[in-house]
Image (spheres, grey):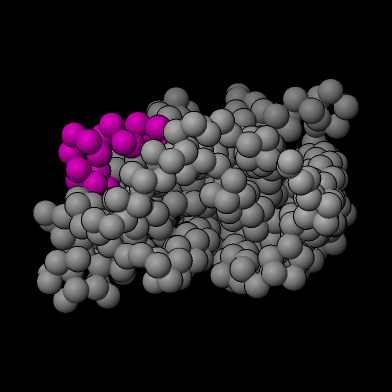
Amino acid sequence: MSELNIKHRGLLKFGILSISTMLQDASAISVAVVGMVGAFSNHSAASVQALVTIPSFSMMIFILLNSVVVKFIGKRNTVIISLLLALIGGVGPAFTSNFTAIQILRFIYGAGTGLYTPLAVSLLGDFFSGDELRSLLGIQAAVSAIGSSAMTFVAGMLVGIDWQSCFWVYFLVIPVLIIFTIAYPKNSDGKNVKKNEVVKNNLESSIEKKSKKLPAIVIIGILLLFVYFSVIMALYTDSGLAIKQLDLSNQGFLGTALSIAGLVSAAFSVLYGKIFKIFKHFTPVVILVISALGFIGMTRVPNMFMFTVYAIMISVSALLVPYVYSTVLENAPASSKNLTISLAMVLNNLGAYISPYFLAFIGKGVGKSDPVSAFLICTFFMITLAAIFLILAIKRQKIVNHPVVKN
């Protein structure tokens, strides 16, 4: 690392980590769903709810385009341009009531976010390594969750003015843009990776050229994560409509409740390593059962306090993401790890995008299309996912206890 980077090490960490505050903020405006459904009564509820998840669709496209863009304009410029796109797409809906225009702006917001999503991790790897890098990656996950919670809280305050005002929350992209621009060296663009790291990566790539096939456990994990995101987004897209259906008092507390749930989720993310040491590969089973109980509670929640409790229970299931990602890193061939993680990110965003339509389709099929019933459907899928992970965990345990010995 150059002398300049050593002198500004702390500022550099702060600058790179700052962009993670914006990674999960597409759902921050979920507090406006009720208002938007009323404003766009000529559109289906699912299509209005999709305004929350449209960024997930464009994110998955631009995550794949990230490497191409970086190749032409560099990492620093990619982050700056993508943050500008996120700013335009984020605040734009505050100034128009045209449904199609809002759809396009939400797509632009996701495009900007998708462009810099892979860089939130790779930039740390460019400048840091070893235990310091692992520590920063843990902080990065927590910063992302905290940023999402903070944005949801602020949006919840702004929606008291009107539903469009909650889009003002994306003006918070501006300080992030300023911090990153000041903190990140102009002439680095990821060229400070240590030579020994490059040699190591080249060595691993050459060693594993013959084993590029992804293990079944990796493929299964990614597909299960896709289903998980198709279900978990109901917490954001259906909550406002559900508490209205249940006629709860103090419904304006929704943004705060979701923010609290996000903060608790961030705390659990930081503790993931310790939690895994306790439950091992039964970790996803435990957290998915807790989440299922939370969704059951949502179907008959009596007040906003208990809504917050159940939202926390559901949010704990976010630990499934680091579990699957660690499974990918442990089992995928070295030459395929980056591509596999990118594929997982794409499917995660696809799952989040189709969530309203997926749940509406299932609900229509079973004759239960109201928001509260959507939580009951989510319960079923969470239990199903828990059962699958239980089978996988038992199978893993059998392999460990009775390994196959090759002659």
* Residue 324 locus on image (x, y percent): 63, 49
Specify the segment rendered in magenta: 62-80
Count of labels in the image: 0
Q: Is residue 297 left or right of residue 322?
A: right
* Residue 29 visible, this orientation: no
Residue 224 against residue 46 in the figure, above or below: below
Which quadrant would the C terminus be assigned to in this image?
A: top right
Residue in the image at 41% along x and 45% along y: 204
Q: Does residue 64 show up magenta in the picture? A: yes
Residue in the image at 23% along x and 52% along y: 190
Residue in the image at 35% along x and 65% along y: 129
* Residue 351 locus on image (x, y percent): 61, 35
Q: Is residue 80 left or right of residue 377?
A: left
Q: Is residue 407 left or right of residue 192?
A: right
Kindly report the secondary structure that dominates the magenta region of the rendered protein.
helix
* Residue 127 locus on image (x, y percent): 27, 62
Residue 335 against residue 298 in the figure, above or below: above
Nearest the viewer among 96 and 85 is 85
